Amino acid sequence: MDNKVLLVTGGSRGIGAATCHLAARQGWAVAVNYTANSLAADEVVRATRANGGQAMAVQADVADEAQVLRMFEHIDAKFGRLSGLVNNAGVVDVTARIDEMSVARWRRMFDINVIGSMLCAREAVRRMSTKHGGSGGAIVNVSSAASRLGSAGQYVDYAAAKGAIDVFTVGLAREVADEGVRVNAVRPGLIETDIHASGGLPNRVRDLQHLVPMQRGGRPEEVAEAIVWLLSDAASYTTMSLVDVSGGR
């Protein structure tokens, strides 16, 4: 790609931040999206620039269409036409059974994890697709092994949302395959990030790593390697793929 411009949603921490750092080292100009923690996003940008990369922080709640539109316009103005998107922004909630969950919780789960990814993908396709005058690009959706496992007794709503991402990945990949846009997903397993603490289970990886054939949790950097490969020209004949990064679980 001549103009490698990448947006990583939820790029200020965890898998998103690791992806920003690795992509910048491989020549991408990176837009680091965040919702509220500007200090964390600014630190990712600072570290990227210190290593000679290009980066900018862009605030937007991906569940809000108006904010998403402004975010893409800001990237257009600063870096030019987008050529890569990583739909990484996502949330979990506290551990609960289905009979303990509220509709408000479900709406938040799907608004951010599913509709947010679809909104960003729509805007990316409008910029990447040869149908719209673009020169192609790649989208990587961050799903979860939960889409296969179901997360029974913890957060089946999160698992269901990630199942929707899997199906969306397959459908969108077919839709834009002949327009120069590749669409794939990674499905991380138990990864050492602070998303578990936000769901009230800060020790979740340690507590469940015995279920992983490799007997350990993964690192955000290990997931980032798969994401950045899928974005790259090395994956030029790969689309509609769901790549498990889960230690065999």
Image (spheres, rainbow, N blue to C red):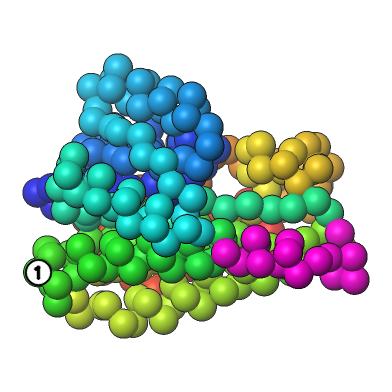
| Magenta run includes residue 32 | no
Q: Position of residue 202 (x, y in %)?
A: 78, 37
Looking at the image, which residue sits at the far top?
50
The reply to whether residue 228 is visible in this rendering is yes
Left or right: 174, with 189 as reference point? left
Where 207 falls versus 164 (above or below)?
Answer: above
The reply to whether residue 145 is visible in this rendering is no
Residue at left offset 40%, top offset 52%? 67
Closer to us: 126 or 212 = 126
Closer to us: 228 or 210 = 228
Residue at left offset 47%, top offset 58%? 64
Tally of numbered tags: 1
Q: Position of residue 146 (x, y in %)?
A: 68, 63
Closer to us: 76 or 205 = 76
**Disc 1 crowd, CA 10 A, few/some/many (<14, 14-19, 20+):** few
Q: Position of residue 171 (x, y in %)?
A: 41, 81
Residue type, label 1: Gly
Q: Position of residue 137 (x, y in %)?
A: 22, 61
Looking at the image, which residue sits at the far front?
66
Location of the C terminus by quadrant is bottom right
Q: Magenta residues?
A: 96-111
Secondary structure predominantly adopted by residues drawn in magenta: helix
Asked where in the image residue 176 lies, by quadrant, the reply is: bottom left
Left or right: 125, with 214 as reference point? left
At numbered mark 1, what does the secondary structure look like: helix, strand or loop?
loop
Left or right: 247, with 37 as reference point? right
Residue at left offset 25%, top offset 45%? 74
Closer to us: 128 or 190 = 128
Residue at left offset 66%, top offset 37%? 194
Left or right: 218, with 34 as reference point? right
Q: Label 1: which residue?
A: 133
